[in-house]
Image (spheres, rainbow, N blue to C red):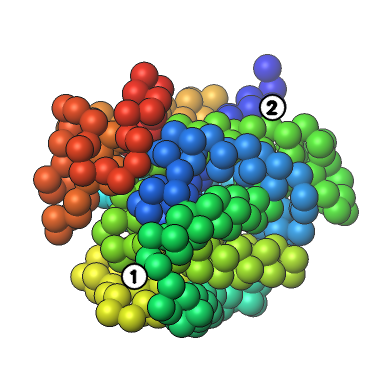
Amino acid sequence: MDIQLFLLIIVVVTALAFDFTNGFHDTANAMATSIASGALKPKTAVALSAVLNLIGAFLSTTVAATIAKGLIDSSIVSLELVFAGLVGGVVWNLLTWLFGIPSSSSHALIGGIIGATIAAVGTRGVIWSGVMSKAIIPAIVSVFVALLVGACATWAVFRITRGLQKDRTEAGFRRGQIGSASLVSLAHGTNDAQKTMGIIFLALMSYGSVSKSAAVPPMWVIVACAIAMATGTYLGGWRIIRTLGKGLVEITSPQGMAAESSSAAVILLSAHFGYALSTTQVCTGSVMGSGLGKPGGEVRWGVAGRMAVAWLVTLPLAGLVGAVTYWIVHYIGGYPGAVVGFGLLVATSAAIYVRSRKNKVDQHNVNDEWKGDLTAGLDENKPSSGAKVGATAGSDDVSVG
């Protein structure tokens, strides 16, 4: 087998692995508040999110074109570079998942690609104006926009329903959350699945099987990425769901519906204009806004601060992993370089997974009371008696904690 074809196969497999991690990493964006408030049972929520992510992936390819052509000079792209960038994204996704931090999969991927590009040809290979205008500035602005919209929406909801019987309003908003959470999942599919489509698109251009003037990825790329993300979503990212649903704000159904609706509006607008937006940062901003907008509500700023630190270091650290991976693969060279690079990725991923099993978070304990950090006070041996939802559902299902 030709070495370039071998590398292409490894790149496609790694890209789909990234899409899979993106799925379970970002399930929380759509479903954390619905699970926390009791609007949906945990496994029902992730199944619904998976289906809608699958559908959403087919609705637009604008973001895929941004990733493929707007961030680095496509003339210098090689399969080694694309592979190294993907490794940076996968490793950062897994590390932040281990610690239950809702960080940006988008920025992890972009950082990995930028780091690998700098390692390959220096800073001249990066389209810095594209990075700023299509990724960094929208990410910064979107957090504050989502926070403001979420706070205003939550304030309006409580203002309108003031004086009404609480049990009746809670029940109504729980039903409403099903719709708003579904909209976020659909929006997530239109935005995040396309990022991996864009990376595979880049690889195919580098290999020469797709013209560099092509406007959209081949259909098989769209289908494969949609399925990979939906599968990851269904397995659940319970560690991040717990942080976003229980650790940041003690959320109720009115807050949840307001936050989800705000997130969906911002994400769909970004997909329309082709911005590679972080759905994680948008949804986190909306959740924080729901805490600020509720009379007497509060935000756990310590948890929010840890998230902010992770956001700040995502690009450089994912970039560092991407750069180191490129150096390893490139300087070993040929089949050995590709095999060593892929082997290191598999070994690192396995080590992180094994570490996560020591403090398992799943559908049974995801709603246990938050006691300062991700795993404090978790009952890992039986379904949680303190959960607001039917947490015994799907007890035999495979899950990614």
Give percent across and percent down for residue 38. 38, 48
70 horizontally vs 10: left or right? right
Residue drawn where x is 77% and y is 53% of the image: 60
Dot 2 alpha-carbon crowd within 10 angstroms: few under 14, some 14 to 19, many 20 or more: few
Residue drawn where x is 87% and y is 50% of the image: 214
50 horizontally vs 293: left or right? right
Relative to the observer, which residue lies in front, 183 or 88? 183
Label 1's element? helix
Give the label on residue 308, or none.
Answer: 1
**Where, by quadrant of the figure, is residue 354 drawn?**
top left
Relative to the observer, which residue lies in front, 121 or 84? 84
**Where, by quadrant of the figure, is residue 325 drawn?**
top left
Q: Quadrant of the N terminus?
A: top right
How far is the residue under mark 1 from the one under mark 2? 40 Å
Give percent across and percent down for residue 117. 56, 57
> At label 1, which amino acid type do we have?
Ala
Mark nearer the N terminus (1 vs 2): 2
**In the rendered image of this protein, does residue 53 appear above or below residue 43?**
below
Q: Quadrant of the C terminus?
A: top left
